[in-house]
Image (spheres, helix red, strand yellow):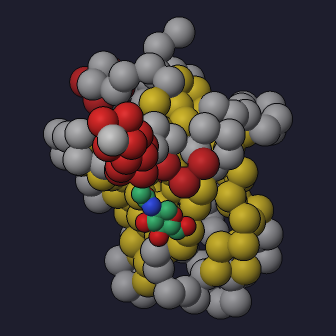
């Protein structure tokens, strides 16, 4: 009887355990689009500077997010195109995402001088969005090495009021 009870407890504990790598981030990036167009994202592929696929991603050096887009009509460029990046770390205690402070460093900054190959035009099929946390040590120093992170990458075009937003979840190395 006692053995059966213990076994039941063990099963309950297992089923309620939090996944260390949510959404299979241990082995691959998980992404979705968080805007409704007009630009539609069809693929997201993190690469190193030479364009080779890279996983886990490394936040210690500039990272390219090769983003395949279907852009029917919009042209975005400086100074109207603004970039905001939000970061979350995976919290095993709550089994949810916890927001990481970015100290306003990544809010509404000029996208075209911060890693976006401007202009973004209808003829673009793949745009390489560069992410570079190496110049924001205040943020990178908060991030534990080899953990799952969630990033929201938002481009907002002031003149047209259009958004291009991608959320991606990835295993990331944050120390060399
Ligand atoms: C896992 O990914 C899906 C979309 O692919 C998302 O809706 C869900 O919130 C994600 N779960 C976590 C824990 O982030």
Q: Quadrant of residue 123?
A: bottom right
Q: Nearer the viewer, residue 11 or 61?
A: 11
Residue 44: image location, x then y, percent:
68, 58
Residue ranking furthest to the top: 176
Q: Is residue 94 left or right of residue 132?
A: left
Above or below for 20 versus 165: above
| Residue 61 is at least partly visible in this image | yes
Image quadrant containing the N terminus: top left
Residue ranking furthest to the front: 1
Q: Quadrant of residue 5?
A: top left
Residue 101: image location, x then y, percent:
20, 40
Q: Quadrant of residue 153?
A: bottom left
Residue 62: image location, x then y, percent:
58, 30
Task: Please tell me which residue is depicted at 64% across the width and 80% down the height of the picture.
Answer: 40
Residue 67: image location, x then y, percent:
68, 60
| Residue 109 is at least partly visible in this image | no
Task: Please tell me which residue is depicted at 49% across the width and 49% down the height of the picture.
Answer: 22
Q: Nearer the viewer, residue 39 or 176?
A: 176
Task: Please tell me which residue is depicted at 55% across the width and 86% down the height of the picture.
Answer: 37
Q: Is residue 46 left or right of residue 168?
A: right
User: For the image shown, how many numbered marks are present on the structure?
Assistant: 0
Q: Is residue 96 left or right of residue 63?
A: left
Above or below for 109 versus 123: above
Q: Nearer the viewer, residue 72 or 118?
A: 72
Above or below for 173 versus 84: above
């Amino acid at each position: 009887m006692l053995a059966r009870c213990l076994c039941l407890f063990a099963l309950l504990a297992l089923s309620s355990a939090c996944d260390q790598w949510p959404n299979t981030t241990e082995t691959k990036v998980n992404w979705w689009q968080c805007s409704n167009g007009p630009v539609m994202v069809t693929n997201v592929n993190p690469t190193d500077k030479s364009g080779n696929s890279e996983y886990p991603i490394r936040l210690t050096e500039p990272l390219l997010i090769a983003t395949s887009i279907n852009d029917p009509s919009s042209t975005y460029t400086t100074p109207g195109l603004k970039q905001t990046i939000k970061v979350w770390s995976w919290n095993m205690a709550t089994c949810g995402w916890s927001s990481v402070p970015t100290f306003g460093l990544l809010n509404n900054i000029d996208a075209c001088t911060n890693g976006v190959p401007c202009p973004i035009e209808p003829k673009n099929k793949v745009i390489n969005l560069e992410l570079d946390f190496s110049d924001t040590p205040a943020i990178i120093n908060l991030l534990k090495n080899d953990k799952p992170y969630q990033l929201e990458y938002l481009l907002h075009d002031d003149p047209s009021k259009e958004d291009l937003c991608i959320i991606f979840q990835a295993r990331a190395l944050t120390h060399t």
